Image (cartoon, coloured by chain):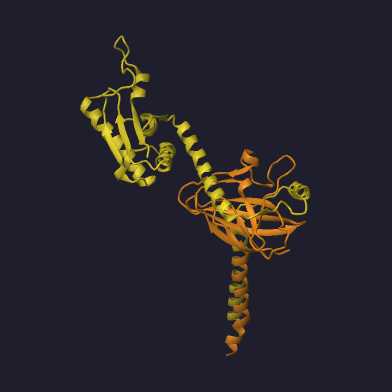
Chain colours: A yellow, B orange
Amino acid sequence: MKSKKFLFILLLTVILASTLFCLTKPAQEEEEVVIPPEAHKNAIKALKALGPNRGAKEIDYRVVKIEGVVLGIEARSEEIQAALKDLGAKETETGYQIDLPGDILFDFDKWDIRTDAEETLKKVGEIIKAYESPKVVISGHTDSKGSEEYNQKLSEKRAESVKNWFAKKARINPEIMETIGYGESKPVAPNTNPDGSDNPEGREKNRRVEIFIKKK
Amino acid sequence: MISFLKKIPFVLIMVFFISAGTVWSGEVIQTQESDSWEGVEVDLLSLKIKNNIVTVKFKLRNTGSEEQRPKIFYDSCFIMDETNQKKYYALKDSDGFFIAGPVSDENRGGRFWFGIQPGKSKGMWIKFPEPADNPETITISIPGVFPFEEIELKK
């Protein structure tokens, strides 16, 4: 009697577990592919318009292969052009220059890459890979606040940090990357106003990382 | 011995439910990897023929660790009847848009360009003309994905 009861409970458990598994698994992992109801009517019309050969085209394997390669290049090129535009890259005869604001990449006085800066660096990484760049120069710059020595070290650490991110996250060969720390020596805007007062906007512009991507 | 025989129906029921669970969890016809988007795999979920129209459903899964943004132009998707050396592109409606979805924008008649987070998936469907020469199998070509070959055409 006891064994019958045990068997009954076991059977019930198996049934329940199987039912639950079936009901929950698709909902967790699959997204329903919904086809609008008018799609099939439109398809019937489209098919009629194609005539008896239904739009058949002769297969030319050579053309199919070339088409595939060209389409891949076109799609890739479109993405890279968009990334260059987003980053405000400047094209020179020898490569691309991308200036990234230090405040976007790092927290104050830090050299760890901020999580929300990763999307920007990812785009730069894609450009480096797309152009198969033989050399990438990453230079760190700071504003003039603090001692010269401190700023020099901070700029070096920041440039190195960007290089490490590219190597680790974007899988770019570290051997093609060179880092330079310029500290506060190469400002792009005045750190102070003519009257000697602080110029926060100017200092913000000076806190930056410049990335030069050499063309192949 | 009698006790062993008594267990047989129980074992059979268990086998039934376990196998049923596997089937109901989502069977796919064929899976192909992408050669353009790291970690993206594409499942061919179904292929149906009605009114000489082939409707295919796919699921794009991101098995990688980073978000991927597959870009698929529907004007570059086609099915091939290799026996008769013919290919058929996706059907277009009277406004010139491909009868396929989902559509992120109307570039080149419509394209799929969505972000897929790691571990997530996105469905896709396309309608093609049924090959006129009634081949037994077809190849489905989706740009950026290895071809789905020897797919049976069953009505």
Which residue reaches farthest bottom? B1
Q: Which residue is more in the foreground, A174 or A1?
A: A174
Tell me if A132 is positioned left or right of B14 in this view: left
Percent position of residue A115, x then y: 41, 39
Instruction: Relative to A79, say whether A59 is above or below.
Output: below
Q: In this view, does A148 lie to the left or right of B31?
A: left
* Residue at 33%, 21% in the rendered image: A188
Horizontal side of residue A146 vs B89, given as left or right: left
Against A118, residue A37 (above or below) is below
| In this view, A4 is above or below A194 | below
Towards the viewer: A152 or A81:
A81
Choose top left, top right, bottom left or bottom right for residue A7.
bottom right
Q: Residue at x 31, y 40 (%)?
A: A177
Q: Which residue is drawn at 62% across and 38% down?
A: B107
Quarter occupied by residue A155:
top left
* Residue B38 shown left or right of residue A204 in the figure: right
Marker count (numbered): 0
Q: Position of residue B130 (x, y in %)?
A: 72, 57
Quadrant where the C terminus of chain A sits is top left
Q: Residue A212: image x %, image y %? A: 35, 33
The answer to whether residue A106 is visible is: no
Q: Quadrant of the N terminus of chain A?
A: bottom right
- Percent across and percent down for residue A189 are 34, 19
From where the camera sits, is residue A178 visible?
Answer: yes
